[in-house]
Amino acid sequence: DVKRQSDLKFIQSALEQYHADQKYYPYQLSSLSSGTKTYLTNIPTDPSGSTTEYQYSPSGTNCAATTPQNCTSYCLYAKMEGTPPTNDSVCASPPSTYNFGVTRP
């Protein structure tokens, strides 16, 4: 679980760097590059090796693949094995296979 939290902070840092330059969040994690700048080359994977990977969910009014400039926030989700830390209030209801979420700092 410590590795999962570390991975989420790493992804979160890349998202915040992207946001600082672009003024919005990407619609997909796979698009964490812009022009010649790359913010995240490899998305960390869950250390268990299971099929439950981290999930990224952008949000905002009319946030879509065709309008990423409307993506003003996000939640990152993980499946913790032990007792998960207290969820961030914005990500308090993770999808059913996840039990922990973080959002922008």
Image (cartoon, grey):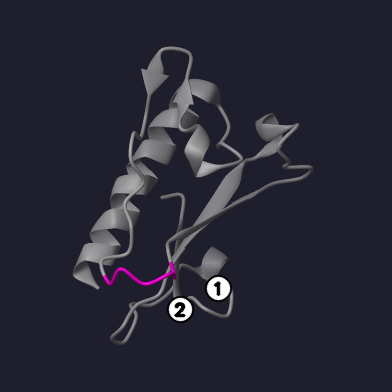
Q: Residues within 10 Å of mark 2 (few under 14, many from 20)?
A: many
Q: Residues in magenta?
A: 48-52
Asked if residue 85 is positioned above or below residue 36 in the image, the reply reads below
Q: Of callouts 2 and 1, which one flags the residue occurring earlier in the amino acid sequence?
A: 1
Question: At 58% from the left edge and 47% from the top edge, which residue is drawn?
Answer: 73
Residue 43 in the image, given as x and y percentages of width and height? 36, 46
Q: Is residue 35 above or below residue 87?
A: above
* Residue 6 placement (x, y as % from top left): 24, 58
Q: Which residue matches tag 1?
A: 94
Most distant residue in the left direction:
2
Which image quarter holds the N terminus? bottom left
Whole-percent x, y for residue 74 in the image: 55, 51
- Evaluate if marks 2 and 1 touch, with contact meaning CB atoms under 8 Å apart: yes
Residue 65: say if magenta.
Answer: no
- The residue where tag 2 is placed is 99
Q: Residues within 10 Å of mark 1 (few under 14, many from 20)?
A: some
Which of the 4 quarters of the picture holds residue 49? Answer: bottom left
Q: Along the horizontal axis of the image, is 94 left or right of 52?
A: right
* Main secondary structure of the magenta stretch: loop
Residue type beneath disc 2: Asn
